[in-house]
Every structure is written in structure tokens, then in C-alpha cells.
Image: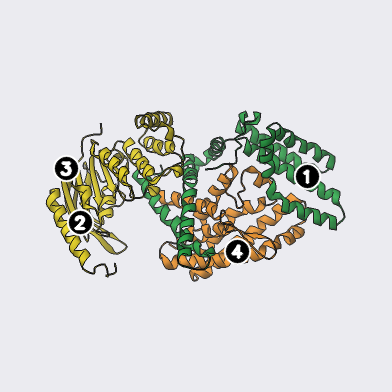
Amino acid sequence: MERSLTHIALFAALVAVLGLVPPIMLGSGVPVTAQSLGIMLCGTVLGARKGALAVLVFLALVAVGLPILSGGRGGLGVFAGPSVGFLVGFPVAAFVAGLVVERWSAPVGLAAGVGAALGGVFVLYAFGIPGMAVMLDKTLAEAALLITAYLPGDAIKVVLAALVTRGIAQMRPGALLSRP
Amino acid sequence: MPPALPAISLNGASVTLADKTVLLDLTLHLTEPRIGIVGRNGSGKTTLLRLLAGLIPPTRGTVRIGGLDPARDRRAMLAAVGILFQNPDHQILFPTVEEELAFGLIQTGLTRAAAAQAVATLLAAEGRSHWAKAPVSTLSHGQKHYLCLLAVLAMQPATLLLDEPFAGLDLPTQARLTRRLAALPQQVITITHDPSVLAQADRVIWLDAGRVLADGAAAPVLAAFAAAMAERGASDADTDLAG
Amino acid sequence: MLTLTSPVDTPLHRVRAEIKLAALCSFTVLLFALHSPVALVLAATVPVALIATGGAVFARHGLRMLRPLWPFLLVLAIWHAWTDDLAQGLAIGLRLVTAVAAANLVTMTTRLSDMLAVIEALLAPLARFGLPPRRAALAFALVIRFIPVLADRLTQIAEAFTARSRRRPRWRVLVPATLAALDDADHVAEALRARGGAG
């Protein structure tokens, strides 16, 4: 009981802290932050349920006014901005990433990579694109076009999520709660 | 005043963690007001403390505090034992000093308002009312340590379990803490690798590889321990891997 | 921990959080029903006027919180210049800025503890499904407590790496940082248990 609660809380804190890491700038000028990588790790390390709850706790604290979204953003305003779809998709992304690692008995790095790609890219975009379409008054296809700028960064994060999850499994067997 | 000392006893208690035997067949009856437990790193000291606090159950044998099993009767244990961890950052749970202090009191059954009142009184008695709203992240290491002690004492346990209470504290802070601990009416069980901390203890237990190597008055046990450690230090020890 | 609540006291600080949130919801719904530029300009005057009541420092804080929007406004400007309907682009941009500014206004004028109280009240019905609001409150407190702890740990890990390498640590901090979070979770669970558990 206590361990579930503290895992959820500490990973919510980890997601917040990863948002403080200065972003890497890609050639396209789009910043790549470690925060959405943290979202993927919530799922691949903690598993579907706890991972999604950790992300929900993180989002609740963003909403109440902590500047813990990457770039020091926070408050209710971010939920009224063009990225709202991504925020709503975050917990679902973590859930799907976790579900893949839990249910698919492939080697952990592969399962985490596929989970992160499905959850952190596919599912996340399925929420993010409609959100942006509504907020910027564009069609879905137009919004999807705008979002392609993020694709290279997200591809890097999928690889990193796989490497980090595998690294944890190697350094501390039994530490992955998604693989009990 | 804390309640009368409930007897702490271990009967053939063993602990196995991840297939490794950490404590082996310990039978102890702990009644003295000041007890010290010494041993090297990895001797099982901290595991023994966690066992006494009911944070882990024994793999074999029994642990009883006032006749109750500390790993099961958690509610009763709040009044029986309080544990101070070595690293305050592992112990402090709340963002501000007053929340940290109030938590334990609410856990023992006080209402939120009563707990807030008790915290204000406690901080005033310690001359630290200005700490109430302070974020714990702004406290120094010594101050965090002190806050942990206050948080545990606020729950008025009959026995206090201390894990290396002086690690990382500067000398004035150590002196203040020693004075404070000496004045406590509670039973205090301290684990440490530093014999000088335990000179005033009523009883010292030397733990090695999960077993009791010596048990008795402070002076002879500590002398034997210090001699053995000096001898080990002189040889080229510490090459064997655990497990 | 630093919050986005403004230290400048405005009349809005004294309005109950629930009322502000309800007003914000209605205002945002209304905003997205509007399409004519004139109506949107009128709507925009609401947050602008309210922010103005807080004085210069408060208004600058409000403007600063709008800064993350500029890349999107730039994209809108280029897009609509290309499709040759700048008026519509202006309307969309105006609506976006107004919605975000109004929401920020609520954040800037509501204390963290009041917001948390609202969240806990909203979670109360979940108690029936075995999720007591007390546990959520505990989780929030733990996160706020451990953000600075983990941030320090991340710095230490990066320094430990830099001390022994010529390369920059970058992503190599991620495994130790995640392990640190897992370890801390175990320690904190134990500390929580030592003081009576999560209830």
C-alpha cells in the first residue's frame, strides 16, 4: 500500500524534475525536453496503472499552479493552450506504454521501446492532434502537419526510454514494477 | 510522559533478504534504558532496527513488543516505538515543517485542528516557532535531523530507535543532540559503528554477520570491539564480495 | 516550492476558488462559441481589464505567463499570411491568448492550498471506489516535498559523471536518476509505515 503510493509520488516528482533539464535543440529549432520521456518511463518502469496514476498526480499539480511543466510552465493556462491534447493524452500514453511492457513477454528493452512508441507517440498524438486542431482552428490533417516537427525528438525519446528501462532491469533486477 | 516500557524480546529471530541471511537466530531481551548496538557495515545492525520497528517481519522466530507483533499491530506500535532513520531526506515526508510534525499526530488519532495546536506548542517550547511555515528543503542537514527527531518525539513513543544518529553532523550539532538524547525519559536503542557514541550506554550488543558476538556492559564490549576493528583495519581486509 | 500564484494582492485573490473556476469554465465555453472578430475583441477585454486591476507588476507577471504561446502565434501568422486570410488568423490567435490569459488569471489569484482543496473535494466521490481523498492529498504533499530532493540528486549525479569524464552527462543521468526515484520510494514507504501508514 505505502509502496504504491510512494512510487506514484516519486515518479510524479521525477517527471517534474526531468522538465527542469535544459532542452536539446534539434536542427528544426524545436526543443526536445526530457519530460515526455519521463511520462514514457512512468509506464515502462511502474507499469500501466501506477504509471498512469503518477502522471495524473503530476498533471493535478500542474493545474493547481506549480510551474513544473517543461519550460517552467504551469497553472490552468496550459490546459487552455494548443498543447492541451498532449496533456490529456499523457496519462493514457503512460498506461499504454506500461501495458505493453506488462503483457508482452519480449526482451525488456524491445517491449519498452514498442510500448514507448505506441503510448508515447501513437496514442499521445491521437490526443495531441485533435487538441491542436480545436485550439488553432485547423483540420486534423493540418494539425498533424504542424506536429511533424516533434517527430524526430519523440523518436529519440522512444530509443532512450527503451535503453533506460533495459538499463534499470540490468542494474537492479527486480526493480521494474512493470515486470513483477 | 511516555507510557511504561513494554518489554522488547526477540526469540530465535532470523531475517533472510533476497536469499541472503542477514540476521541469524537472535534471542534478546531488551529492557535497559540505554542500549547500543555496534557492528561493521553489513553486520545486520540496520536490519535489526527495522525488525524492532516492525518495518519487516522475521523470516523465522518471533519479535514481541509488550506482547504484540510489531510488524502486524502497527497502530499499537506508534505509541511503542519511534525510529529515526540515518538519512533525514528518507524520513521527511512533507514540504513544510508544520505539516511534517502534524502528520504523526494525526496518525495517532488527533484531529487536524488539535494537531496544528500541538505543533504550535511544540515548536514554541523548542524556541523554533519561526520554523512552522519553512519549506523543509531550506533546512540544513543538522536542522533536518533535528526536525526528524521532533517529529518522532511528538508521537511520544516509549522506545526510540536511532540509526547512526550522528552521521554527517558537525561537532556542535552532535553535542546538542547528545545532550538532548541523554535527557529523554524514553528507552533509546542506538546502532552505530562508532564506539565513542555508546560510552554511556547501559548495555552494548556487538553484532557480526547477523549474530551476537558479545553482549554486556558498555566498557568491556566496546573495548573488545575497538580492538577487533583496529586489528582488521591493520590487515588488508574488505576484499571479499557479498553474497 | 515556488508557485505561480502572484504575491501582488488583487480583489480576485479574495474570491472563492470554486467561483473563479466555475466562471473560468463558462467564459472558456463562451469563447469557443464566438467567431466574429468584434465579439472576440470584446471578450478579450474581460481578462485584460481584470489583469489591469492588479497594477504593473501583476500585469507583467501575466504577460510573462503568455510567453510560451508565441511559437504558436508565429505559426498562425505565417499560415494565414500564406492562405491570405489574416483576419481569421487574428481571430484564432486572439481567442487562444484570451483563453490562456483568463485561465492564468485564476492561477495567479488563487493560493495553492485553496486549489488543492478544490481538487480534494472533486476527488471525494472516489472514496466509494477505495480511493480516500486523504491518500491523494498525501501523494500531492510527497511530490512537492521530493521535487527539490530529486532535483538535487540529478545535479549530484551529473557532477559525479562530469568529475570522471570529459563528456557531458546528458541522457546518461537518466538511469541513475530513475533508480534514485525507485530507491527513494522504498525509503519513504518505510518512513510512512514507521509513522502509521497511508491510511
Q: CA distance from mark 1 to mark 2?
A: 72 Å
Chain B visual colour? yellow
- B163 to B157, vertically: above or below: below
Chain A visual colour? orange
Q: CA distance from mark 3 to mark 1?
A: 75 Å
Find residue C94 and name its label: 1
Mark 3 or mark 2, which has the lower sequence index?
3
Find residue A80 and name its label: none
Q: In which chain is the residue bearing label 4?
A: A
* Screen quadrant of the C terminus of chain C: top left
User: Which residue in the rendered view is the most extreme toward the right?
Assistant: C84
User: Image check: B141 left or right of C70?
Assistant: left
Neighbor class of circle 1 (other Cα within 10 Å; few <14, some 14-19, many 20+) is some
Find disc 4 in the rendering and name its residue.
A118
Residue located at (55% from left, 38% from top): C112
Find residue B207 and name its label: 2
Q: Secondary structure at mark 3?
A: loop
Residue A30: image quadrant is: bottom right
Q: Return the x and y of residue B16 as percentages of the image width and height.
A: 27, 60
Q: Return the x and y of residue A40 as percentages of the image width and height.
A: 55, 60
Q: Return the x and y of residue B140 as percentages of the image width and height.
A: 41, 44
Neighbor class of circle 3 (other Cα within 10 Å; few <14, some 14-19, many 20+) is some
Q: Amino acid at mark 4?
A: Leu
Res A1 seen here: no
Q: CA distance from mark 3 to mark 2?
A: 17 Å
Residue B235: image quadrant is: bottom left
Find disc 3 in the rendering and name its residue.
B32
Q: CA distance from mark 1 to mark 4?
A: 35 Å
Q: Secondary structure at mark 4?
A: helix
Q: Amino acid at mark 3?
A: Glu
